[in-house]
Amino acid sequence: MEKPAICGGTPVRDTKIFYGHQYIDEADVQAVVEVLRNGDLTCGPKIGELERKLCAITGAEYAVVCSNGTAALHIACLAAGVGSGDEVITTPVTFAASANCALYCGAKPVFADINGETYNIDPKEVEAHVTERTKAVVAVDYTGQSVEEDELLDICRRHGLVLIEDGAHVIGTKYKGRANGSIADMTTFSFHPVKTVTGGEGGAVLTNSKDYYEKLLLCRSHGITRNADLMEHEPEGSWYYEQVALGYNYRMTDIQAALLISQLDKLPMFSARRKEIVARYNEAFGALPQITLQKEIPESDTTRHLYILRIVPEKLTIGRRQFFDALAAENVCCNVHYIPTYYFPYYERLGYRKGICPKAEKLYGEMITLPLYYGMTDQDVEDVIHAVTKIARYYGVEESGNHET
């Protein structure tokens, strides 16, 4: 067998392939150009158009778009009434914003462990961490697979909690036939460039609650309203507005909204291609004893945002770091999603310590994020498979004594 490039062999690819990349076509470009030409760059008609489109796609009653996914999480927590002294349960296998949103409100993030097979937050672990201080659960649809909505909603209803679904990865996924975004009390989306659809940046909160919707609108825009029903004084004229709460400037521009409207037209196409790539990866890697596949619950019809390769340490003579470096040497440039949030120095200073979520920590030590995005060609996919297979077999325990030179 030819050695991996890290050991001096010839790389699988001459050019690099990265773990994620946006897809922009001429329709996207023209959508942005149209906004630039018509003069409504922000607070214009594209905001409402995008919100209506998100509702149509997900089945949610209301949508509030904002500047990014982190802002979406923040205003969702504010709308839920999260405040000083409260606790918010979330997973450590996520971007830091899923926990930071609690800190922004003066609350304490509480980390619950994952299901070791699906990698999503384990409902049993969530319930085990509920206290009299718990206000909300921020459940992350990790990699795009839906969380166990029914189980989490049942826990939240029994304990009087708000279920905030961090759906940064989940757009295009369905749970029991319903689009994610219409199920939890509030669902947040992110439109970063590596996500399934992008606005360059951007976020959204979806809900079926009018009360949450009105609070979200205030939180998004300085706590300022022109709605006479929410004002405390008689309007003095058509120009009149009031600040009735303390909010933020988390508005989205019409430029971003126009791009997202165009991108959402391609969501079925994006979803189908991602499913094709995941199916091919699963077929190929399922035959490798050195690799464990992420399992999916049958209720989730998943549009995958990330593809996680998980090594089996006892079947390899190298660890995750060496496997990662070997893939880079093959010009397959991967990533790791995510470092457990409480590993960070900031969280250490807050008193968090390693060991509180053993399944999440074990996953972190064994996972690598492989390339997955709409624009990948079939050859790109096969090159990734070739590189992973080459390295896994070369460093496999069964072959470790007989590497060919």
Image: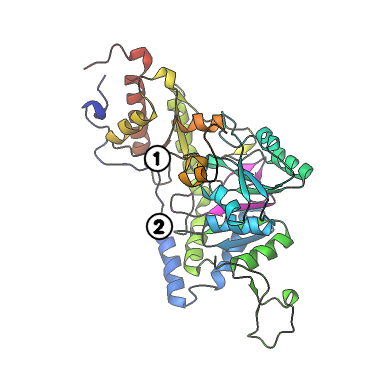
Q: Residue at x 32, y 37 (%)?
A: 332
Q: Answer yes or no: is residue 160 visible.
A: yes
What residue is disc 2 on? Answer: 25
- Image-quadrant location for residue 324: top left
Q: Residue 199, percent across and down?
A: 47, 59
Whether residue 360 is situated above or below residue 42 in the rendered picture = above
Q: Residue at x 78, y 42 (%)?
A: 158
Q: Is residue 147 left or right of residue 28?
A: right
Crowd band around label 1 with a 10 angstrom C-alpha radius: few (<14), some (14–19), many (20+): some
Q: Is residue 14 above or below residue 205?
A: above
Q: Residue at x 46, y 77 (%)?
A: 38
Q: How many marks?
A: 2
Q: Residue furthest bottom?
A: 237
Question: Which residue type does callout 2 highlight?
Answer: Asp
**Secondary structure under the numbered disc 2 in the rendered image:** loop
Observer-side mark, 1 or 2, equals: 1
Q: Would you place residue 354 above or below residue 249 in this image?
A: above
Where residue 335 is drawn, which disc sits there? 1
